[in-house]
């Protein structure tokens, strides 16, 4: 309808912002305008921080968590962690929520994804080889599969349970499924209730 | 609870993202992780675009719209625009929505804000001097005050109506207030209904 539009550099910024997760076209435009109204004093340092993070943050070669060094990260280097426990997660972003729960003080291993035939992700694309190496070299007594409860997470858990069969005496567990904390039954779907019933535990 | 956290460059990025309008701590973390998982290939060009926009986009010295040149922008340079109409808006971001409405083909003037004693913004902080210069030099027959209908917008409109009194024969109008398009009466607040009644127009 109108030939008037934002100048090209601003349009390019809106395009970049729209790609971010959870940012729609309206939000992208609002954020871009907010940035333009503040100008170089805000965009300059922001751009530098963004570039620096992209440049400096790498995947820890051991556990797969975000790190500034490829050989060892705050998690892997940490003393007073339980050397017998290894918690396997799908992605590095899953680690901090588990850590913040305070219920786990062992080591972590991010797979960098989950088996998903639809997205062409097979076991060979995941950090499973690295996991086997760690299990052979370490003194782990238990591997906790902290994977999602969706189809891909379940498939990955089953694949891993099989692949880890070679380790005699290694305990393989997975996260409990059931009611989320603070959630009433009226908000739980049927599958969650089924799992909660199947996993019911004795009281007293 | 936990001493483990994201590496510093990632934390710095989360801080920057949290400052953006409409982005809470959770969204900032999710976006930052999304960016880290994509790495330098995505963050590099994004950072360049951001820095370029902040560097290259300036305020048009004439109308106040976003421009890549301080002297004239796509709006001011545009031919086949009505030279008799000037639409005054609070901020450059207000211009494109009006333009997209298709109901206006005159010129624009962004004030770069509105009178707000609470935020220490007085008439001297706005582009009112520039407005007077344009009115003296141009052949405008009507100034449309397209300001917000909040207290500050109203105060700014009243101030401008007075300040523009020196221009004999200049018509000063403001946007109609009433029901938003497609909105039923049940969603309108009392003040909106009062304005809609006061501004009622004859049919047929």
Image (spheres, coloured by chain):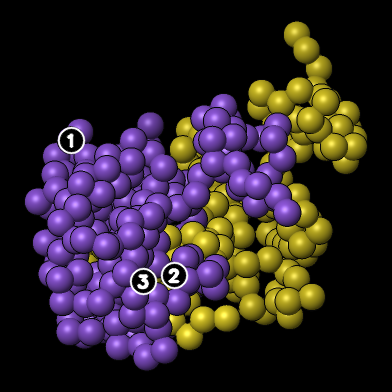
Chain colours: A yellow, B purple
Locate residue B110, reporting x and y percent.
28, 64
Q: Earlier in the sequence, mark 3 or mark 1?
A: 3
On-image quarter of the C terminus of chain B: bottom right
Question: Which residue does the numbered mark 3 point to in the structure image?
Answer: B85
Do callouts 1 and 2 point to residues on the same chain? yes
Q: Which of A204 and A113 is in front in this view?
A: A113
User: What separation in Å lies between label 3 and label 1 (alpha carbons)?
Assistant: 30 Å
Q: Position of residue A84 (x, y in %)?
A: 52, 46
Direction from residue B41 to residue A84 in the image, left or right: right
Q: Where is residue A151 in the image (x, y as percent from the top left)?
A: 81, 58
Which residue in the structure is indicated by mark 2? B96
Disc 1 residue crowd, few under 14, some 14–19, many 20+, Cα 10 Å = few
Which residue occupies 44% across, 70% down?
A: B96
Chain where mark 3 sits: B
Answer whether labels 1 and 2 touch (C-beta < 8 Å): no
At 17% from the left edge and 84% from the top edge, which residue is drawn? B71
Disc 1: which residue: B117
Can the viewer see residue B17? Answer: no
Nearest the viewer among A157 and B87 is B87
């Amino acid at each position: 309808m109108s030939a008037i539009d934002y100048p090209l550099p601003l349009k390019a910024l809106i395009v970049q912002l729209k790609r971010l997760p959870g940012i729609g076209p309206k939000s992208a435009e609002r954020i871009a305008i907010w940035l333009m109204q503040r100008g170089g004093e805000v965009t300059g340092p922001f751009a530098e921080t963004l570039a620096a993070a992209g440049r400096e943050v790498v995947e820890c070669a051991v556990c797969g968590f975000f790190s500034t060094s490829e050989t060892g990260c705050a998690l892997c280097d940490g003393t007073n962690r339980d050397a017998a426990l290894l918690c396997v997660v799908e992605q590095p972003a899953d680690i901090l929520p588990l850590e913040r729960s305070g219920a786990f003080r062992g080591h972590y291993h991010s797979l960098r994804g989950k088996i998903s035939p639809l997205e062409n992700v097979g076991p060979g694309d995941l950090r499973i080889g690295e996991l086997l190496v760690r299990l052979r070299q370490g003194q782990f007594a238990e591997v906790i599969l902290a994977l999602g409860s969706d189809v891909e997470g379940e498939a990955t858990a089953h694949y891993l349970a099989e692949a880890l069969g070679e380790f005699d005496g290694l305990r393989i567990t997975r996260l409990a499924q059931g009611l989320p904390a603070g959630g009433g039954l009226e908000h739980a779907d049927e599958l969650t209730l089924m799992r909660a019933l199947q996993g019911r535990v004795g009281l007293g």
